[in-house]
């Protein structure tokens, strides 16, 4: 009889990824069949030592891209921690597949405490040639990035593209998803796959929004979003109404858009100031960009790009606050 190997993945108290692996007898592919499992919450700051059992509840399963040619079935299993105050996924009560999200996840690859490709004792050349760059002098880590893309696709995650970013060793990939929970599940699992692949390469993944001081872009997670109304039969007022609501709730958004985001949202390097809300057509220096596709449709069909979220933000927080604001 074959076994099924389930790699349970969850979030710790500080939004850090955790995992452990369970072997079960026989075949098992449906989430509903996957058992609850406990872990020591006192070691993850999710429970006190005298009452430390926490329960993992499987919510979504993905084919495990790290174990393909085997006789057993392997799955990565996204889990909620039951009755955990840090469980942001559980706060999403209404979850419609008419909500579409496209995350642009930026990050730096580090090795030996430095961004990949940087000289050991000095900075890289000023940014300019690295964005969508080509050639060994302009790109560092492409093989790793390509393997991550293939692994995500194998897992069923709708990764839609990758590109080198404005600093050497900085990259971005894009993930599309429908529904608040579903899109955020996939983004978290794509991060998990990125970290696991980093283990194999000896790379550290840096999600800090401004890891390098000075004249360098930070790392964000620009979030493109649309609703059924925005995509079908919209009008200019549909979008200006949403933007007005986002202006009014700017502080609520910033509060959940990632730690240390004030270091990135300075009004420089394609960002708006953290204490101001702005929007503009094709403006990457605004809080929210109105994309060309939306403009060219005459505002009858399109989406908006929220450029405020940091690279380390929790996508469950992002999808929830955006939809709460749109339907306020």
Image: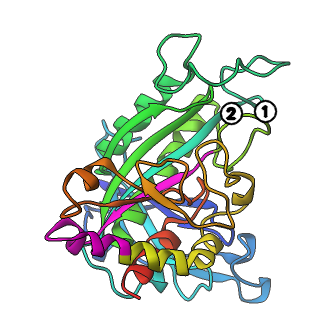
- The answer to whether residue 270 is above or below residue 119 is below
Percent of width and height locating residue 30: 25, 68
Query: Mark 2: which secondary structure?
Result: strand
Residue 273 is tagged as none
Contact between labelled residues 2 and 1, with CB atoms less than 8 Å apart: yes
Residue 284 visible in the shown view: yes
- The answer to whether residue 293 is above or below residue 201 is below
Q: Residue at the spot x=36%, y=85% of the render?
A: 327
Q: Residue at the spot x=42%, y=31% of the render?
A: 147
Q: How is the image coloured?
A: rainbow
Residue 320 visible in the shown view: no
Query: Mark 1: which secondary structure?
Result: loop
Quarter of the image holding residue 23?
bottom left
Task: Identify the residue under disc 1.
Answer: 113
Q: Is residue 107 magenta?
A: no
- The answer to whether residue 279 is above or below residue 46 is above
The residues colored magenta run 219-240
Furthest toward the right, the residue is 121
Badge 2 local density, few (<14 within 10 Å), some, or many (20+)?
Answer: many
Badge 1 local density, few (<14 within 10 Å), some, or many (20+)?
Answer: few
Percent of width and height locating residue 103: 42, 54
Q: Is residue 222 left or right of residue 150?
A: right
Percent of width and height locating residue 122: 83, 19
- The answer to whether residue 104 is above or below residue 124 is below
Task: Identify the residue under disc 2.
Answer: 110
Q: Is residue 61 left or right of residue 274?
A: left
């Amino acid at each position: 009889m074959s076994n099924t190997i389930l790699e349970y993945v969850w979030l710790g108290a500080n939004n850090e990824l955790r995992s452990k692996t369970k072997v079960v007898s026989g075949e098992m592919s449906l989430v509903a069949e996957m058992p609850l499992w406990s872990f020591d919450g006192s070691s993850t700051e999710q429970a006190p030592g005298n009452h430390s059992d926490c329960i993992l509840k499987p919510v979504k399963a993905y084919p495990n891209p790290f174990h393909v040619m085997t006789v057993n079935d392997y799955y990565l299993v996204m889990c909620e921690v039951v009755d955990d105050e840090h469980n942001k996924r559980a706060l999403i009560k209404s979850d419609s597949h008419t909500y579409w999200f496209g995350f642009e996840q930026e990050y730096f690859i580090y090795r030996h405490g430095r961004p990949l490709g940087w000289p050991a004792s000095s900075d890289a050349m000023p940014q300019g040639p690295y964005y969508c760059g080509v050639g060994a002098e302009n790109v560092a880590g492409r093989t790793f990035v390509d393997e991550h893309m293939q692994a995500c696709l194998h897992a069923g995650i709708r990764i839609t593209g990758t590109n080198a970013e404005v600093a050497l060793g900085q990259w971005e990939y894009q993930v599309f998803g429908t529904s608040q929970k579903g899109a955020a599940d996939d983004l978290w699992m794509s991060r998990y796959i990125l970290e696991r692949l980093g283990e194999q390469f000896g790379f550290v993944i840096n999600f800090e929004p401004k890891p390098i001081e000075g004249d360098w872009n930070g790392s964000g997670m620009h979030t493109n979003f649309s609703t059924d109304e925005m995509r079908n039969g919209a009008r200019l007022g549909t979008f200006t109404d949403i933007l007005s609501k986002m202006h009014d709730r700017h502080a609520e958004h910033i509060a959940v858009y990632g730690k240390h985001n004030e270091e990135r949202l300075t009004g420089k390097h394609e960002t708006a100031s953290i204490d101001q809300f702005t929007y503009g057509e094709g403006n990457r220096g605004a809080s929210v960009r109105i994309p060309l596709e939306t403009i060219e449709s005459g505002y009858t069909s399109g989406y908006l790009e929220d450029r405020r979220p940091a690279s380390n933000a929790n996508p469950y927080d992002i999808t929830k606050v955006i939809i709460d604001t749109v339907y306020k």
